[in-house]
């Protein structure tokens, strides 16, 4: 996020500041140059963080083999429309990845009007560790205990063991 803000600030801040200077020249209320630029930068930081959170909450983690075939890497994919499906441990859909696209198929006959569900991640799969899964999606697959109790007892799902 910080790198994105730094990169964007080089061209966003001068553009927005220039527009604000034009408004000031028209006798509209504005602030002085330094506080104006600081305000623009702060708002840019907030916007980039919000965009980052939205992107993370809509992305899917996928294990892929590295180019040399020796390691497995995790890539984040954005899958428009598929990202609106709710999670279920008994989903009625499955994703089939191909080289250039991903196909969403029904696992069984689906009735008209029946909601489609996808399994974001199996309970024993840790492509996304539980603490990251929780911060992305707001829950941990298979966890039935209230999340506040899990955090209060400093569960190893979220905390390093001492």
Image: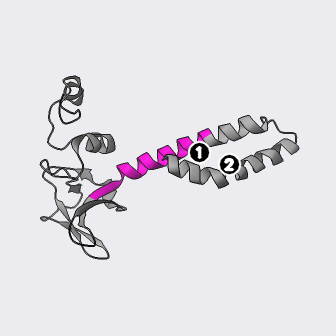
Drawn side of residue 47 relative to residue 58, left or right: right
Per the picture, the main secondary structure of the magenta-coloured stretch is helix
Within-10-Å neighbours for mark 1: few <14, some 14–19, many 20+: some
Q: Is 54 part of what is drawn in magenta?
A: yes
- Looking at the picture, the colour scheme in use is one colour
In the rendered image, residue 58, in percent from the top left (x then y), is placed at: 36, 53
Q: Are marks 2 and 1 in contact (CB under 8 Å)?
A: yes
Give above or below for 155 relative to 2: above
Residue 75, image x and y in percent?
31, 60
Viewer-closest of 150 and 114 = 150
Identify the residue shown where x is 30% and y is 44%. Answer: 137
Along the horizontal axis of the image, is 2 left or right of 89?
right
Work out whether residue 50 or residue 132 is closer to the camera in this orientation and state it.
132
Residue at 36% over, 49% down: 57
Which type of secondary structure does the marked residue at label 2 adopt?
helix
In the picture, the disc for residue 44 is: 1
Q: According to the image, label 2 marks what residue?
A: 13
- In percent of width and height, residue 134 lies at 27, 40
Residue at the extreme top of the image, as rendered: 152
The answer for how far apart the CA atoms under marks 2 and 1 are is 8 Å
| Closest to the observer, 4 or 26 | 4
Q: Earlier along the polypeptide chain: callout 2 or callout 1?
A: 2
> Is residue 55 among the parts visible in the rendering?
yes
Element at badge 1? helix
Q: Residue at position x 55%, y 42% from top?
A: 45
Which range of residues does the magenta coloring cover? Answer: 42-61
Counting from the top left corner in percent of width and height, residue 50 is at 48, 44
């Amino acid at each position: 996020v910080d790198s994105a803000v730094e990169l964007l600030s080089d061209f966003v801040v001068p553009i927005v500041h220039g527009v604000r200077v034009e408004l000031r020249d028209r006798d509209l209320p504005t602030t002085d140059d330094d506080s104006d630029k600081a305000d623009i930068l702060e708002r840019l930081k907030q916007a980039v963080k919000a965009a980052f959170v939205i992107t993370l909450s809509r992305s899917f983690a996928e294990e892929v083999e590295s180019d040399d075939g020796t390691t497995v890497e995790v890539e984040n994919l954005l899958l428009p429309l598929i990202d609106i499906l709710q999670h279920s441990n008994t989903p009625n859909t499955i994703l089939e990845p191909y080289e250039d696209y991903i196909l969403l198929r029904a696992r069984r006959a689906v009735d008209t009007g029946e909601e489609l569900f996808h399994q974001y991640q199996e309970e024993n799969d840790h492509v996304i560790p539980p603490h990251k899964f929780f911060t992305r999606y707001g829950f941990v697959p298979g966890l039935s205990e209230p999340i506040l109790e899990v955090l209060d007892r400093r569960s190893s799902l979220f905390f390093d063991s001492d």
